Image: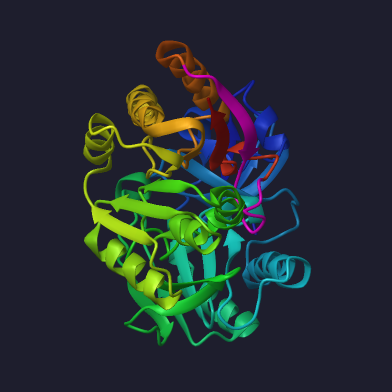
Amino acid sequence: MTLPRIVVQPGRVRPFFGRHPWVFAGAIARVEGDPADGAEVDLVTPSGTFIARGLYNSQSKIRVRLYSWEERTSLDRDFFAARLRAAIRWRHDVLGWQGPETACRLVFSEADGLSGCTVDRYDRWLVVQFTSLALAQRRDLMVDLLREILAPEGIMLRTEKGIRDLEGLDLHDQLLWGEVPAEPIRIREGPVVFRVHLREGQKTGFYLDQRDNRQRVAALARGRRMLDAFCYTGGFGLHAAQAGAQAVEGVDVSEPALELARGNAHCNRLDNLEFIRRDVFTHLAERAEAGERFGLVVLDPPRFARTREAIGEALRGYRRLHALALRLLEPEGILVSCCCSGLITGEMLTLMLAELAAEMGRDIQLMEQRGAAADHPVSVSCLESNYLKCLISRVR
C-alpha cells in the first residue's frame, strides 16, 4: 500500500534522521497525496528517501508525529501492542512498580515512542490522556490493548487544558471502560498514604513525577518549619511531616485539593500540618511582611509557560515567587524550586537565582539538580520530554 508522503524542506531533515518525533508545519515542503487527519503517512527527503512513518494532523502545529523509522513497519494493532508492552514491562519488571495501592506512569508519550499518549496506573485502575488527535482517534484500540495487557477494573480518560486549540481535538473527561470509583482511592508512596480522585483534579489525579523529589525533600525537613507553596493535595508537606518536620504550612488556591490534603493528613495520623486556601503570591507577601521565617520553602507552581511567547512573562513570575521565598527563608534555610514548564530550562532558573542572590544579598548554594521519577524517562531524541526541574538550594 502506498501512503501519502510528507516531503521535508531542504536542510531540515537532520532532526528526523536523529529520531525527533515532531514534524512542525514549517519543516514541510509539500504534501503528496491527500491524507485525512489521523492518517498514516511517510516522511521523506526532498529526493524521496524514506525517513520515518507517522500520523498526520493538518490542524496541529505538529503536522506529523513520528513513530517508526522502519519502512516495513505498519502503525497497526501489533505495532501499538508492542510499544505498550515494552513500556509497561519496564515499569513492572525493572522498576518493580506494581501491586496493591501502587501508582506509577506506565506510558510516557514521546519517551516511550507513543507521542501523544500517557497512561497512569492507580492501584487497579488506569487513567489515560491523549494529546494527539491521531491516537485519540485510536482510543478504542488503545483501550482494548490495555485491557488485554493489564486487566484493569476501569479506564478513565482525562483531558488536558487547551488541547482543542492545539490539536483540533474535542475530548471530555469520561469513563472509557469498566468502572472507576466516584470517591477518592488510596495509593501508597513510601511511608505515606494518599487519597487520589481519578475523576477530578490536576493531571491524571496526582503528580506522580515528583515521587522521588518528595522523598528527598522529606529527608531534609526534620526539625524545620516548612512552607509548601502550591501544595495541591499535600504531596511534599505530608512526606516532610512524616519525616519529622516541626510544622508544615501548605498553601493552595483550590479548596477541593485542600480538602483532599486535610483528609490525607488525617489518614496518616499527622497533626503538624495546616492547609490554607489563599493566592500563593499574596500569602507569601503577607507572611514576609509579618516577619515570618521558615527553615524550608517548597515552590511547586503550575506550568507558567505554554508557548515560547510566554517565556518572558513566566520568568518574571518565577522571579517574583522566588524573591518572596528568599524573604521568608531563615539563614541556612533550604529552598526547593520546582518548574514543570518544559520551555523554561534549568539554566534559566539557575541564572535567575544568581541574579536574586546578588540583589538580595543572600548566598545561594545549589546542592542538587533533580528531575522526574524513573517512570517518566527522558528520550535523548526528544529533550522536550525533560520537562521537570527540581533545584534544591542552601540559602545563607
Which segment is the magenta one? Answer: 362-378
User: Where does the N terminus fall, quadrant-wise?
Assistant: bottom right
Residue positioned 42% across, 80% down in the render? 185
Asked whether residue 156 appears in the rendered view, the answer is yes
Residue positioned 32% across, 68% down in the render? 262
380 vs 211: above or below: above
85 vs 68: above or below: below
Residue situated in front as seen by the camera: 334 or 194: 334
Q: Which x, y percent locates residue 299?
A: 42, 41
Does residue 367 show up magenta in the picture? yes
Does residue 300 show up magenta in the picture? no
Left or right, 183 with respect to 384, comes to left
Left or right, 173 with respect to 78, comes to left
The color scheme shown is rainbow
219 vs 181: above or below: above
Q: Which x, y percent locates residue 176?
A: 40, 78
Residue positioned 40% across, 48% down in the render? 228
Left or right, 215 with respect to 169, comes to right
Q: Which x, y percent locates residue 235?
A: 46, 59
